[in-house]
Structure formats: C-alpha cells, structure tokens
Image (cartoon, rainbow, N blue to C red):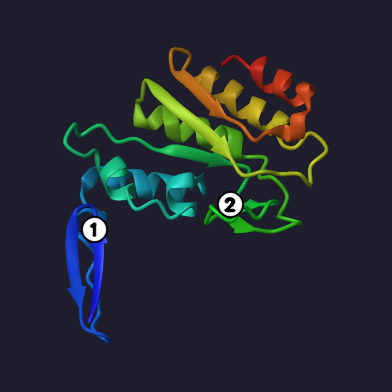
Amino acid sequence: EMCIRDRGIQLRRVKGERLRLPPWLKTDIPVGSNYARLRDSLRDKRLSTVCEEAKCPNVGECWGGGESRTATATIMIMGDQCTRGCRFCSVKTNKAPPALDPHEPLNTARAIADWRLHYIVITSVDRDDLADQGAGHFAQTVREIKRLSPLLYVECLTPDFRGDDRCVETVAGSGL
C-alpha cells in the first residue's frame, strides 16, 4: 500500500491499482457551438493555434466561451513546427520546417474579422531557419489584421528573435 499526499488530500493506493486523477486535473471534452465554430473556421483557413499545438487542456473552456460565453484563442503563425526543442513545450520540432504559407497573413486576418473580436493575441513558433526569423511575416500578419479590422487591438507574443533588435523593430513598426 502506498500513501500519496497532494493538496491536503491523502490518497491511498494498493500496489498495481490505478490511481485516478483528482477532480481539479480533469477537463471536459470540448463541445458546443462556439467551440465548433472556431474549430471549423481555423480548419477552413488552415490556421494553427497554440491551444491545439501545445495540447492545452483548457481549449474547450477557452474556445467554448466558458461561463462568459466569450470565446478566446491565441493564433500561432508561421506553421506548427518550431526550430527549437524546448522540453516544456508540446509543439512539434523540426530544424528545417516547411516554407511559410504566403496566404497565412491574409487568412489570419479574415478569420479574425469573421469572429468579430475586439482583442487578439498572435504568437508563433520559433523560425531560426529564416533570415529575419519570421519578423516580416509577423509584421505582414499584423498589417493585414489592421487593414480588415482597424479598431482591433493586436497583441504579439513574438519569439526572442535571438536578441536581434531589427526583428523587434520590424514587428513594432507594423501597426500594433
């Protein structure tokens, strides 16, 4: 018999017996019209989200709208394959990922315009294989978003660009 103590709860388990997850670690299977609408829109425009790629357990709550019924998502641009292999992340790693999709900036902007949001977060994989590490693609995505939704607030969670200030300037000058 083994005793496990977690969050003030003591669980006892007989050797070989499967220990069930505590209730605070369980999430519902994603369902609902908000979730389905957002998922279908992302698939239709071939977009990635950090929600899916990083296997976030809260995707159903965020996309479904939770109690507030406001669906949220963080768009992940530049594909779904990162050139770094950080141990804490579930995003696929590839030292030579596919070329950037030239339609992604406009497709991203169209999807966001369709969702009629007031605020959006754009993030990305690391693309150390590109000369500008994807800063130009980031900037083009922001310009397209602002062209279709000029009043939308856009937040960018960029890669570290390996400390290259020119990349930061490119994104910062995009109309955020």
Q: Amino acid at mark 2?
A: Asp
Residue 2, image x, y percentages? 25, 77
For image coordinates 60% across by 29% down, the residue present is: 141
* 20, above or below 58, in the image: below
* 124, above or below 68, in the image: below
- 42 displayed left or right of 62: right
- Disc 1 on helix, strand or loop? loop
- 98 displayed left or right of 67: right
Residue 103, image x, y percentages? 62, 40
Q: Give the class, few, some or many, for how many residues have Cα within 10 Å of label 2's Cα (few <14, many ≥20).
A: many
- 138 displayed left or right of 115: right
State which quarter of the image contains the C terminus: top right
Closest to the observer: 176 or 161?
Answer: 161
Q: Name the residue tied to disc 2.
A: 80
For image coordinates 40% across by 44% down, the residue present is: 41
Cα–Cα span, label 2 and label 1? 26 Å
- Disc tally is 2
Quadrant position of residue 131: top right
State which quarter of the image contains the N terminus: bottom left
Of labels 2 and 1, earlier in sequence is 1
Residue 171, image x, y percentages? 66, 22
For image coordinates 43% across by 31% down, the residue present is: 112
Q: Nearer the viewer, mark 2 or mark 1?
A: 1
Q: Give the class, few, some or many, for how many residues have Cα within 10 Å of label 1's Cα (few <14, many ≥20).
A: few
Closest to the observer: 95 or 64?
Answer: 95
* 79, above or below 138, in the image: below
Q: Amino acid at mark 1?
A: Lys
For image coordinates 20% across by 34% down, the residue present is: 69
- Disc 2 on helix, strand or loop? loop
- The answer to whether the residues at label 2 and label 1 have Cβ atoms under 8 Å apart is no
Q: Name the residue tied to disc 1.
A: 26
